Amino acid sequence: GTPPNFLNKEEIKGVLKVMVEREKYPIDFPKFIITKNFEKFFKNHYYKSKLSKNKEILFNFSDVTFCDLFELCLITLWINELNDGSKEIKCKLPMDSKAYNFFEKWEFVKFLRDKSMHLERKGIIESKEYPEYEHIQPITFFPDNGDFDNFIKSLEDEKRQQDIFKDLYYNLDVISSGVMRDIIIAEIGENIFTHAKGIGALMAMGRINKPQKTMLPEFEQSFFRALGKIKGLGETGYLQIVICDQGDGFKKVLGSTYEEDESIPIDERENPTELKIIDYAFEKMATSKKGKPLSEIAEDEDYERLIPPKGLYFVKELLKKKKGFLSVRSGSSIVCYDFLSDNKAKIYTSQDHMHLTNFGGV
């Protein structure tokens, strides 16, 4: 409404300022956007931003000096979900030059511009804090299965793979052999379109040098500690592949299947936790495969070339064979498989799963 006409100029300014502030919902991001602090921050703001009656949502990245690629993908999905026309979304981009370049290289800024969002940058600050994070594949949305299939087919071209992965193509046989394309990327991608119907399907890839321990959540520290003890490993950096969707999540999709699976003890089938169902997804998805028994295929040194692999089971088994690390965030849980420091592949969570925001598939 209009401020009362009996107020003086200063009082009118104050009333107008309050009115403007009420129309805005500000989301002020911390200096470091990493798993260790992001999940709590996300829980504090996600539902409020969705339910807010404010006309404008302000994503303020001004103070950001580092952002992990996975968290940037989550933020992209968050903004994409809010961008339904009911609210105006504005973004203040990082003042830190390296953080801003990171947003640019992974085409997050392009994503915001394509959505016609209002962007501003308060200033420019030079910083040496940012770890080297090499761009490989920008944040890429796949509106339908055909777009994803075309991307996979493009990776069949050896020259294109060399252009994308550069020296990693020659240093990692998991790339040059086509295994990463045919198992890790293709199978998780198929899962996105089969079960999540491709809602918010996106992918990004990057290489980061050895991360600082202070930036790692507890469930990743054991992997990098073990890696540091093995001479020659990790010297060329680490390949990070992020594949996300915003479907219903494993619990909603597989919950009833888990509860009806007679191979699972009946007491375990009653009220299963989300963590158990996520773990189950990486076993159950391979049961329809025809041919050799799964146990024989997984134990074969060359199993990925025996038959076209199908299912998330093979993603996990490949990473086990290659001593990799798999982190899965679904619903309000995070499950991690560390195949380097613990061959039993214990399940880790970042914290009690009730403390995480339920954000669908991811």
Image (cartoon, rainbow, N blue to C red):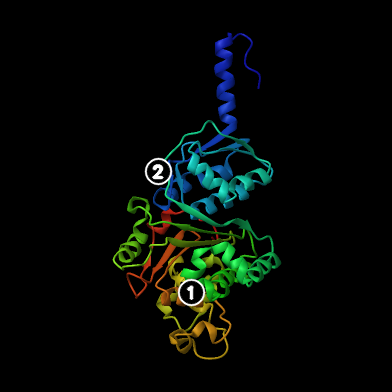
Q: Nearer the viewer, residue 300 or 245?
A: 300
Q: Taking 196 as reference, is 339 left or right?
A: left
What element does badge 1 sit on?
helix
x and y, in percent, of residue 178 in the image: 56, 75
Residue drawn at 49 percent across, 65 percent down: 168
Location of mark 1 (residue): 173
Q: Nearer the viewer, residue 18 or 66?
A: 66
Query: Image quadrant for the C terminus?
Result: bottom right
Location of mark 2 (residue): 129
| Amino acid bearing label 1 | Asp
Among the two numbered marks 1 and 2 on one chain, the one whose residue lies closer to the N terminus = 2
Residue drawn at 59 percent across, 14 percent down: 12
x and y, in percent, of residue 265 in the image: 41, 81
Q: Quadrant of residue 288?
A: bottom right
Q: Is residue 100 above or below residue 157?
A: above
Residue 329 seen in the current view: no
Q: What is the distance, in whole Å, between disc 1 and disc 2 at their CAs? A: 32 Å
Q: Taking 172 as reference, is 196 left or right?
A: right
| Amino acid bearing label 2 | Glu
Residue 213 seen in the current view: yes
